[in-house]
Image (tube, rainbow, N blue to C red):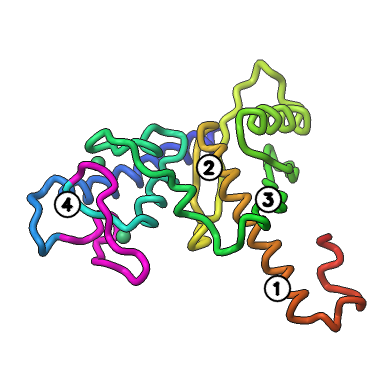
Amino acid sequence: MGDSQALNSSLTCCLEEDLGGRLDNLAGPKDSAADVCWVCLEEDLPGHPLVYPCSCPRPVHPPCLARWQLHSAGSKEETICRFCGQCLPDWKTVLKPCCNEAEKEKATPTMSVTFNGMIHHILVKGGPDGYRKFVDDIRTMFGITEELDMHLAFDCADPLSGQLVKLNGSGAFQAAVHCATISAAKRLHSRQLLHLQRPRFQNATSPFAGLR
Ligand SMILES: [Zn+2]
Ligand SMILES: [Zn+2]
């Protein structure tokens, strides 16, 4: 419990520090020289023109804003601009993989859950039912009774860059499931590509046999 508390505060500090620097950009007067993304401070990027998703005077790249929202998963800043209060676009529609919807449907997202040195792999799904099942599974597997509060922290892969993102609190569960689903769909996609590229090995002993 102590560790997860410490992680919580260090993550919060890091985000607030980042935000402080960007705040000046957002609050400053608008001029053409300042038409840069308020997150990464770059101009238009190939395939990612700058947009104005809310009433704020500064533009942003959709993936930069989506990553910002992912880092805020579970708080109101995941869906609402903290500066102007307007609703933001759903980050999950921006941070999605190149693989198709069918692969996403077939993907079986899992999470590795560690507690007191024990580790279990759990199949997860989104939605309120998915969260209740996740919590029930964890309590059963690790023998955690109802009287004990659980502090959840998720280590996720950013769906686009693959970089590690640390999310804290039960409110981040749905975001973590989205990241896990994308990772599972990517694994499925690369296994299918491998089979397409090496059809002659189909009947031989496959190095991936153990993963099926
Ligand atoms: Zn940007
Ligand atoms: Zn705004």
Disc 4 within 8 angstroms of ligand 1 (CB): no
Q: Is residue 55 magenta?
A: yes
Residue 175 has which mark? Answer: 2
Question: Badge 4, how many Cα within 10 Å: few under 14, some, many 20+?
Answer: some
**Residue 46 left/right relative to 95:** left
Looking at the image, is mark 4 or mark 2 earlier in the sequence? 4
Looking at the image, is mark 4 or mark 1 earlier in the sequence? 4
**Amino acid at the residue labelled 4:** Asn
Real-space CA distance between mark 4 and mark 2, rounded to the nearest whole angstrom? 28 Å
Q: Which residue is mark 3?
A: 105
By secondary structure, the bulk of the magenta-drawn segment is best described as loop
**Secondary element at image label 4:** helix
**Amino acid at the residue labelled 2:** Ala
Question: Badge 1, how many Cα within 10 Å: few under 14, some, many 20+?
Answer: few
**Secondary element at image label 2:** helix
Q: Which residue is mark 1?
A: 193
- Please name which of the two marks, 1 or 3, marks the residue nearer to the observer: 3
- Please name which of the two marks, 2 or 3, marks the residue nearer to the observer: 3
Real-space CA distance between mark 1 and mark 3, rounded to the nearest whole angstrom? 17 Å
Question: Badge 2, how many Cα within 10 Å: few under 14, some, many 20+?
Answer: many
The answer to which image quadrant residue 54 occupies is top left
Real-space CA distance between mark 2 and mark 3, rounded to the nearest whole angstrom? 17 Å
Looking at the image, is mark 3 or mark 4 earlier in the sequence? 4
Q: Which residue is mark 4?
A: 25
**Secondary element at image label 3:** helix
The stretch in magenta equals: 35-56
Q: Please state the horizontal and vertical placement of residue 207, each as a whole percent of the image.
A: 83, 73
**Residue 157 left/right relative to 61:** right
Residue 98 can be seen in this image: yes
